[in-house]
Amino acid sequence: MPMKEREDDIIIRIPRKLYSKELQNMIDLIEHKKIVSKSKITEKQVEEILSDIKKERGKEMKQFLKKRGIINK
């Protein structure tokens, strides 16, 4: 596989016939690591945000189900 190094990048050429879901997952992981590396948020802050989102989503889902008569609580 040909590889080219540039100032801030490494370019790897992969034949199209080798493209697969697994390869796309690897590309997505690399992109994720690039984005996360720029983040200044702590793991604790992420957990707090996720907890708040889950609580709010639970409230909204409960209201949605009540409106449709699926639950009576």
Image (spheres, rainbow, N blue to C red):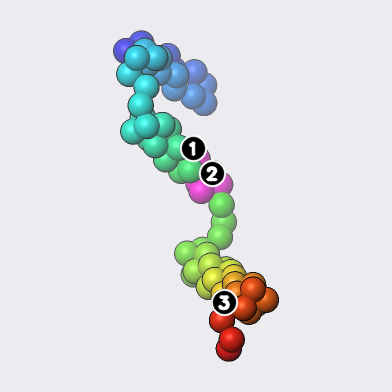
SS for tag 3? loop
Identity of the residue furthest to the right in this view: 67
Residue 3 can be seen in this image: no
| Residue at screen point 57% across, 77% down | 70
Specify whether 22 is left or right of 9: left
Q: Amino acid at mark 2?
A: Ile
Q: State how far apart marks 1 and 2 are (Cα).
A: 6 Å
In the image, 52 versus 5, the foreground residue is 52
Q: Which residues are magenta?
A: 34-38
Q: Which of the numbered marks, if any, corresponds to residue 70?
A: 3
Tag 1: Cα neighbours inside 10 Å, few (<14), some, or many (≥20)?
few
Res 24 → quadrant: top left
In the image, 36 versus 70, the foreground residue is 70
Choose the circle earlier in sequence order: 3 or 2.
Answer: 2
Q: State how far apart marks 3 and 1 are (Cα).
A: 41 Å
| Residue at screen point 49% across, 18% down | 6
Say which residue label 1 marks: 31
In the image, residue 36 lies in the stretch drawn in magenta: yes
Provide residue 45's location: percent of width, then percent of height.
Answer: 54, 68
Identity of the residue furthest to the bottom in this view: 73
Provide residue 4's location: percent of width, then percent of height.
Answer: 42, 14
Mark 3 and mark 2 in contact? Answer it, CB < 8 Å: no
- On screen, 36 above or below 10? below
Mark 1 and mark 2 in contact? Answer it, CB < 8 Å: yes
Q: Which of the numbered marks, if any, corresponds to residue 12?
A: none
Say which residue label 2 marks: 35
In the image, residue 63 lies in the stretch drawn in magenta: no
Identity of the residue furthest to the front in this view: 69
